[in-house]
Structure formats: structure tokens, C-alpha cells
Amino acid sequence: MFAFPFKLPTTATAPFCPSEVAGTVQVPEGDPFWKKIIRFAGPGLLVSVGYMDPGNWATAIQGGSQFGYQLLFVVVLSSLAAIVLQCLSMRLGIVTGKDLAVHCREQYPPAVGKTLWGFAEISIIACDLAEVLGCALAFKLLLGVSLPVGVALTALDTLIVLGLKGKGFRQVEAIVLGLILTVAICLFTELVFVQPDWHAVAAGLVPSLSALSSREPLYLAIGILGATVMPHNLYLHSSVVQTRVVSQHDQAKRQAINLSRIDTIVSLLLALLINGAILVLAAAAFYQPGNDRVLDIDDAYRLLEPVAGTALAAILFGLALLASGQSSTFTGTIAGQVIMEGFLKMKIPCWQRRAITRSLALIPAMIGVLVLGEHSVGKLLVLSQVVLSMQLPFAMYPLVSLTSQQRIMGNFANAWWTTAIAWFLFAVISAANAWLVFQAFT
């Protein structure tokens, strides 16, 4: 009988179970402001990973290759909406000391709570499917293996989780930062190779209804929106902010909220730059006026080399895609622990949680690439974003509702204008996602 050369943990282990590391990052009262900013930096980075995963790559590459820089403003507006929602999530966790999943279990009837849990788990699996496909494509490019073999190799990332079981939460945040910087450096180096038209980039930043006047760009714009705002991130953020030690008096909470807001905004602006860079790269490299060809992510890496004039371009693309998928491995595991513990009051070892989620994503990914062939990654990635879009309203509604109630938030309840903006975003995003899902199935 096979035996592991090391002992597998039998209980939920840090740093992937936020309840076990809550309050472990000390923030001395006497520290200067800039030191406090550094100590509060981290949770926003973990959340930002979800905004630059391979699913975002797929929609951004399609948007840039088909419509040039025209949809760049959609990336910007989607990211601004994400900042608003993540700030609400962060504030809920700091003020109440409970994450969104716990609140849903406590505030809603059991049947509603279990339904919300089911939708949250589906969103994590859909996001993990995108990670599997993105990493498989990266392995195919970098190692020369077939796509099914690349899918199988992604199962090994559970070993990464095991290797980090004894590390602290700050170490995980540092690793994620390193992966994000890898993605950023690779993409911005690519931009040097392809030399975008920066005047056209600036024009693409200006919101334009005419750019969305026909069905095709509108469909893709909503796809970008659905790929940007991640449902499980709303649960994740409200939990990981509790890793910082915060006193219970209002002044300390207010300072923690302000410092965490800086962390959130800076991190998501970095994600915005990366998402924008992907679309700009696709537009500069592949867009041709009058050509309606839709370029999938699995075509992009093959065509980058002749466009950029160097084989390094395709390698950098593969490295960035691999770093993007692997960074999501950490946040997906943490979000899974948060959701399972919050909704079900259940803890399992982090490697088991990772293995279950990855297994549920590997099966449809393997079936998809075997049935649809080697060039199916783009279609499957877009499908995963449609599934994510369907789950988003079920995370947004409780978040906006709970943070608007003085009974729960006390003096930190949403101002009337914050509530108005949040419900407006809920209505717009829900309607857009409903339209996207309708179009996908019709």
C-alpha cells in the first residue's frame, strides 16, 4: 500500500484557513502611518488575483483582437465597480468581525443559506476550471505537452498547498505578490515588443455608447464585466481582512477601514492595469480594421511570435498565464475554506479542500479538451465566465443588504449615497449577466 513520505494534516491548517490566522498580523498603535499601510497591505492582493485569472485573459483577448481598443473603457468601469463592492466586503469583515458567509448563515433561513452556499461553491469550481485551462495551456506552450497532459499536470498544485501548510499568512501574501509582479513584468515586456498605438489606447479609455451599439461588442463587454467581478471574492475579502489585529472601539475600526481601503484600491488598480494590458496587447498584435475574426486565447500565443518578431514573446505569454493560474490556486483554496466554514461550520484539511475543488474542475476540463480538441480552451474559458456570471447576484444581494443595515453595521452602515450606488451596480450587473446568460443559451 502506498504511503506518503510525510504525514498529511488531519485538521484545517494555517495559512489557508483564515479563522485560524485571524488577528495574527500585529499593527502596533504607535507605528507611523506609512508602516501601518504596509502592515495592512496584503488582503487586497489576494482578492486582486481573481480579477486577472485566465478567464479575464480570454475575454480581454477576444475583445482586443475583434474590436481593438474600443472596449478598454469597459475594463476600467468594471474594475471601478469591483472596487466599490470589495470595499463593502472589507468593511463588513472589519466592523462585525464576521465574514459574509457567516452572516448569510446567521441572517437567513437555513434553506436560503444552503442555497447561497451551493452557488458560492459553483463559482469557486467555475473559477478553478479557468485556472486549470489556463495552466494547461501554459504547460502546453512551455513544456510542449498535449493539452490533456497539461490538464493532468494541474492536479499537482495540491502539493504546493501542502508545502505551505506551516507558513504564515504574510508569506502567502508575499508569494501572491511575487506571482502578480511576474504577470505584470511579462505583459508589459510584451507591450514593448508589439508597440501599441497609445493615442488609440487613450481614445479607448473614453466611455462610448456607440462602441456598444451592436450585439457583438455588447455581448463581449458584458462578458468582460462578468469575468471581472468574482462572486467568491466578496466572501474571501470579508474574511482575510480579519487577519489584522483591530481594537473594538470605533476609532480603531475607522482607521482599519481607511488603511484597508488603500490596500484594496491600489491592489485592484494593479489588476486593472494588468487586464488593460492584456486587451491592449491583443489589440496591438491582432486587431485589423474590417476583420471580424475572433481570436481565442489558444491562438494568441502561437501568433505572438511572428507579430512581435521574437520567440521570447510567446514564452513570456506562457509564463504570465502560468503565474496567473497558480496565484489563483492560493486564493481559491482560502475562499473555499471561508465558504465551507462560514456556511456549514465545517473545517477540513486545506489539502483535502484543494483536492476536492480541483477534482471537480479537472473532470469537465478533461472532458472538454478531449471532446472539443486541442483548440477548445478559449471556448471553455468563456463558458466558465458565463457560469460565474450566473452566481454573482447571489453574492452581491446579501452583501449590499447587510452593509446597509444599522442593526448589523452600527455607525458604519452605508451612507444613503453608498447604498444607492451599490444597488445601482447590483441592478446593472444582474441585468447584464442575465442578458449574457440568455444570449449564451440562445
Image: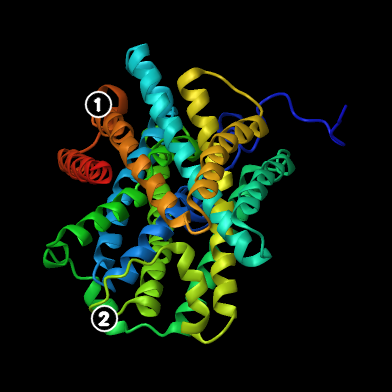
Q: What amino acid is found at the position of numbered circle 2 in the picture?
A: Ala
| Depicted 278 relative to depicted 375: above or below | below
Amino acid identity at mark 1? Gln
Label located before the other in sequence (1 or 2): 2
Image position, residue 336 (x, y; %): 52, 33
Camera sees residue 265: yes
In the rendered view, would you say 297 is above or below 135?
below
**Which of pointers 1 and 2 indicates the residue nearer the eye?**
2
Q: Residues within 10 Å of mark 2 (few under 14, many from 20)?
A: some
The residue lying furthest to the top in this view is 110
Q: Residues within 10 Å of mark 1 (few under 14, many from 20)?
A: few
Task: Name the quarter where the N terminus is drawn.
Answer: top right
Instruction: Give the colouring mode of the picture.
Output: rainbow
Q: Residue at x 52, y 24 (%)?
A: 341
Q: Quadrant of residue 348?
A: top right
The image quarter in which residue 115 lies: top left
Mark 1 lies on a secondary structure that is: helix
The residue under label 2 is 200
Give coordinates of residue 414: x percent, y percent.
23, 36
Residue placed under numbered mark 1 in the picture: 406
| 305 left or right of 119 in image | right
